[in-house]
Amino acid sequence: MGSKVRNVYQEGELLPISALQHLLFCERRAALIFLEGLWQDNTYTAQGSLLHEQAHQATVECRDDWRIVRGLWLRSLELGLYGRADVVEFRRTQRETTLTVPLPGLAGLWQPFPVEYKSGRLRREESFEVQLCAQAMCLEEMLGVLVPAGAVYYGKTRRRLELEFTPSLREKTRATARRLHELITTGKTPHAVFRKKCRSCSLVGICLPTAMSHKKSVRRYLKQAMERGEDEAPA
């Protein structure tokens, strides 16, 4: 069975699993969405939302020794997270191990395998891997079972990338969850810093990283100029 976990958070303190992806992309983006309640779609986010809507239609499908559950609600009191899995595949086996769990009303034992849906082409993306790992850790806590692997499904190429939830990925997931709670607890939105990836962010028109960074650089220039002036002033 899965390892015993510590209940670190209360029900009212749980934050969305999806926030982990935003946090790893940009902490300011995460704050704008989850602190200030701001959102704006672009082509990429609209495609992703459509894919998630289709996956989140709560259904159960049986295929021989597979049971496919869509839109399954998840939570972890250790991580302080909640959310919905796009898909959890349960694979039937007759052998009892730390990877299997009984399901009510069904014969045999079942091994859960979470699948996260993303738009775009097959690629490695740390934020997607952390998000999926968090879902696996929720399943472990809820079912008392080990979940060693899962997959990210990419809609553009209709291919999936299978991932192993290694100790390092699990620790990264814990650290990201802790940082998310710290950010929300402080209630402060980080300053804008323009980076190349800002161009693909749907919130670039709200965040205004170029303008904000320029404004900050002007203030810094004036402050440095005044400090130089004071140093050069005659005694």
Image: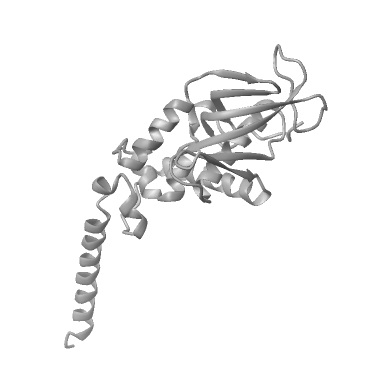
Colouring chosen for the image of the structure: one colour
Q: Is residue 94 left or right of residue 59?
A: right
Please state, as top left, top right, bottom left or bottom right, where the N terminus lies in the image.
Answer: top right
Which residue appears at 46% of the width and 43% of the height?
Answer: 21
User: Residue 225 at what x, y percent from top left?
Assistant: 20, 76
Q: Is residue 207 above or below residue 55?
A: below
> Residue lying furthest bottom in this view?
234
Q: Residue furthest right?
A: 95
Vertical position of residue 27 compared to residue 45: above or below: below
Residue found 32% across the figure and 41% down from its top: 43
Q: Position of residue 34 (x, y in %)?
A: 38, 37
In this figure, what is the number of numbered marks?
0
The quarter in which the C terminus is drawn is bottom left
In this view of the protein, which residue sits in the foreground, 192 or 85? 85
209 left or right of 73 in image:
left
> What's the residue at 58%, 18% (across, down)?
60
Q: Is residue 229 visible?
A: yes
Residue 182: x and y in percent read: 47, 44
113 shown above or below 92? below
- Rendered residue at 56%/27% (across/down): 74
Q: Nearer the viewer, residue 13 or 165?
A: 165
Quarter holding residue 32: top left
Measuring from the top left, give residue 134's x and y in whole percent: 57, 38
Q: Residue furthest top?
A: 105
> Which of the 4 quarters of the picture holds residue 183?
top left
Judged from this view, the residue extending furthest toward the front is: 157
Asked if residue 8 can be seen in this view, the reply is no
